[in-house]
Image (cartoon, rainbow, N blue to C red):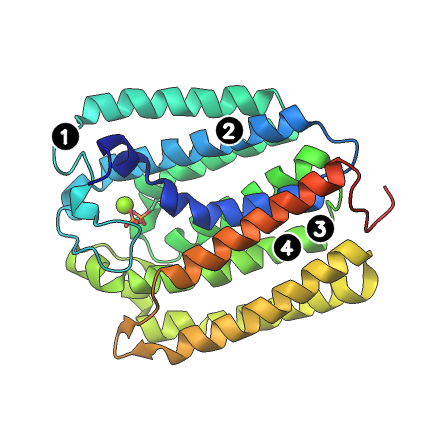
Amino acid sequence: MRSKYVRLLRPIAWITFLLPFSVGLGLGITPDSNLLHIIFAFIAFSCWMSFSFIVNSIADKDVDKLHNGRSKDMNLAYQPIATSEITEKEALYLSMIFLFSSLFFAWLINPLFFLLILIVDGVGYIYSMPPTRLKARPIGDILCNTAAGGLIFIAGLSIGGANMFPLVILGAFVMTSIFYIPTVVTDHEFDKKAGITTSAVYFSPKKILQAMYPLTALLVIIALIILLTSNLELKVFASIVIIYTIPSTLVVNMNLKEERLFIHKNWILVPFTLISIASVGYGILKLFGLLILNSY
Ligand code: DMA
Ligand code: MG
């Protein structure tokens, strides 16, 4: 079994937020960007994720014991706080170290990046922890994840500062909400059993998955406007968004049987990892002046 600290931090689950962060970073970088800022940004990102997942496992310790391993990066019953391998106090100390480290490294980058990391740290906290514990409130869960995905995208963009257009940012928020919805449905059975009223438990899996349709329509409109009005880099980006999102929405809705969504976790993890690597690679090529789609 993986080390207790890996099970506490859950790096595989970070991939869901690595995607908006990396795409933002890739789009934002220019040949004038600072390589050190990019490295600090990844450290700040990792510390934010570590903080958020630690407070999540503290807040979820009683419900995680009920998990059966389905549709997750790990069987949550093996989370080290649930198994008592790590005490709540040790976890709290660790979470504070990660919180301060995320802010410290963010502060080295730029004021906007710092402010955004401060906010997403706050979102990570109110999502999991009482008294707010928004993950257990219908719509609250979707809003938190949408906010976190959209804001970390802006943080990624701000490192280099290119392409910071309202429509691009709005697209990132809408896209995050679309891709978050299936994950709350795969958790439905477990959340229901654990008595957590997520959006999927409250509205039913079928209804909440149908919400992906109007959101996808909105995203396609945004992407088409970007496609018609923007630079070559954003045109390519908008095309990929359309090509990826429409089939995803259809496939997800077709794979709901009764109340169960039959989607293997690798359908999210593998493409998200590949797109993240491609985006960062693209950003690095721009940084070294090896690939220029736009003139900065
Ligand atoms: C996962 O939240 C944690 C973060 C920080 C997004 P969750 O408790 O809703 O999911 P899981 O059941 O995977 O811990
Ligand atoms: Mg949890």
Say what secondary structure mark 3 lies in: helix
Q: Residue at x 16, y 26 (%)?
A: 87
Place of residue 207 in the rendered image (x, y in percent of width and height, measured from the top left): 37, 74
> In the rendered view, would you say 52 is above or below 242?
above
Choose the circle earlier in sequence order: 4 or 2.
Answer: 2
Identified by mark 4, the residue type is Leu
Say what secondary structure mark 4 lies in: helix
Determine which residue is flagged by label 4: 170
Q: Residues within 10 Å of mark 3 (few under 14, many from 20)?
A: few
- 288, 32: nearer the viewer: 288
Tag 3 near tag 1, CB within 8 Å: no
Q: Which mark is residue 27?
A: none
Determine which residue is flagged by label 1: 85
* Image depth: mark 3 or mark 1 in front: 1
Identified by mark 1, the residue type is Glu
Measure the alpha-carbon separation of dots 1 and 2.
27 Å
Determine which residue is flagged by label 2: 44
Say what secondary structure mark 1 lies in: loop
Place of residue 181 in the rendered image (x, y in percent of width and height, measured from the top left): 41, 62
Q: Is residue 33 left or right of residue 63?
A: right
Choose the circle earlier in sequence order: 2 or 3.
Answer: 2
Q: Residues within 10 Å of mark 2 (few under 14, many from 20)?
A: many
Quadrant of the image for the N terminus?
A: top left
Determine which residue is flagged by label 3: 166
Residue 77 showing in the rendered view: yes
Q: Is the residue at mark 1 in contact range of ligand 2, meaning its CB lies under 8 Å from it?
A: no
Q: Residues within 10 Å of mark 1 (few under 14, many from 20)?
A: few
